[in-house]
Image: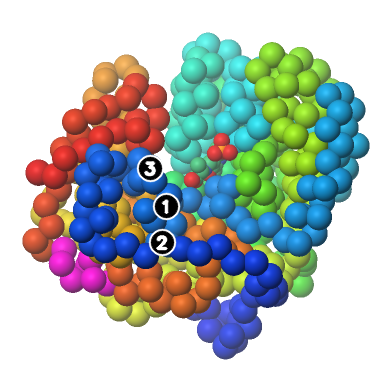
Amino acid sequence: MPESTPKTMGQQFGRRSWAEPWKIKMVEPLAVTTREQRQKALEEAGYNTFLLRSEDVYIDLLTDSGTSAMSDRQWAGLMLGDEAYAGSRNFYRLEAAIQNIYGYKYIVPTHQGRGAEHLISQAVIKKGQIVPGNMYFTTTRLHQELAGGIFQDVIIDEAHDPANLHPFKGNVDLDKVQSIIDKYGAENIAYISVAGTVNMAGGQPISMANIKALRALCDKYGIKIYLDATRMMENAFFIQQREEGYADKTIAQIVKEFCSYTDAAWMSAKKDNLVNIGGWLAVNDWDLFEELRNLVVVYEGLHTYGGLAGRDMEAMAIGIEESVDDQHIRSRVGQVLYLGELLLSWGIPIVQPIGGHAIFLDAKAFYPHLKQVEFPAQTLAAELYLDSGIRSMERGIVSAGRDPKTGDHYYPKLELTRLTIPRRVYTQAHMDVVAEAVKAVYDARETTRGLKMVYEPKYLRFFQARFVRL
Ligand code: F0G
């Protein structure tokens, strides 16, 4: 049962107290377009928001990945780039920041998250091994499958229900893990793949109690736990707000404790770490580190830069330090909650509780008259762009892809359109505009037609697939 029902933003913070702990020093103009211009741009993009040009977008909520605004300290840090091929000063600074904040021993930089996923999947997964995970993420699962692994979802059932109010919908269902162990044997499990702030579940957190219990279970069988730390800071915020015993702990303390129950982590630094590009792997096991350090030179670059410039590593080190600031994370998640609560107050169907990095519109509830193969979430993303120039992302059947064995679509229970909020970029007035646009599209829902896919790439099809209106 839920430990406590999530509170509204007002109950949690008091009025206004989520306001940003920064002010704006530099601005970037936005494009304001007409409906005719947007219609043309959308047709040229094959009704896929990934194929729109950024200059045709007004408010870009495609992703929170690589879209953060850097601080003045980070920009200053760029000038301290040590662009040596080997042994850059900035690498050692980054290494120390990760060791200090996340607590792992050995660090391998990569150009972004999927570079790290590739290396760790190749290093540890043996063909045919099971990789249980608290819901899949697109690139994570693909790298696990390309390495010969078989992904199995072990998230709690509540995560698949957009209306369920469980405060930790990212939790792992230990019974599901136990039955995989019983069925296949511990030696046939590569590792447990655990994500903080589970992206595809709607940005839902996993609790400290759950990771502790998973650790105890895995210790019984000698199974490793690897963490996707991409949005771990946001997860820590929900633990602080919702889990007993953590209200007086800092984000930094919570992150350190959580990571201590895991054996290694991979990271897309483009999210929590507040940089535009970068990633890393962090492990405690020397042998695994040796293997990863060897692989990184094949695929990314030398182990002291991993596909990054020295200046990128400096900005990341500073971003990591800024990302654990309690005021920062409170305002970051506070802005997401602000938008979500506004939409809820207007009766718009969204995934609840509101997640850490995005609002997920429930496209099945928007368009009950559309079949899932008519791509309701893709349709909703297209309609939102058309209405107002707001760019969102499909997270439904298109993202789920096809079963490699049968070739049929995966039919995920969640058919969602994600409004992802970049960190430190948009204002509350922008959030109001977004909410009004969603309302306009919602009001026109009954007459909205679906889409047909006319081009489908083999891997990660959502990035480049093309559609026409039915
Ligand atoms: N893990 C999670 C949970 C992610 O959300 C992402 C990326 C990755 C790994 C891969 O990292 O993009 O640096 O290679 N998510 C982005 C998104 C693309 O929009 O949610 P990457």
> Does the stretch in magenta take in 355?
no
Q: Which quarter of the rendering shows the C terminus?
A: top left
Q: Are marks 2 and 1 in contact (CB under 8 Å)?
A: yes
Crowd rating for badge 1 (residues with CA inside 10 Å; few <14, some 14–19, many 20+)? few
Residue placed furthest toward the bottom: 15
Give coordinates of residue 38: x percent, y percent: 26, 55
Residue at horizontal 47%, vertical 21%?
145
Give the label on residue 55, or none.
1
Instruction: Name which of mark 3 and mark 2 comes first in the sequence.
Output: 2
Q: Amino acid at mark 2?
A: Ala
Q: Which mark is drawn over residue 31? A: 2
Badge 3 is on which residue? 50
Region rendered in magenta: 439-445
Looking at the image, can residue 445 be seen? yes
Say whether marks 1 and 3 touch (CB < 8 Å).
no
441 in magenta = yes
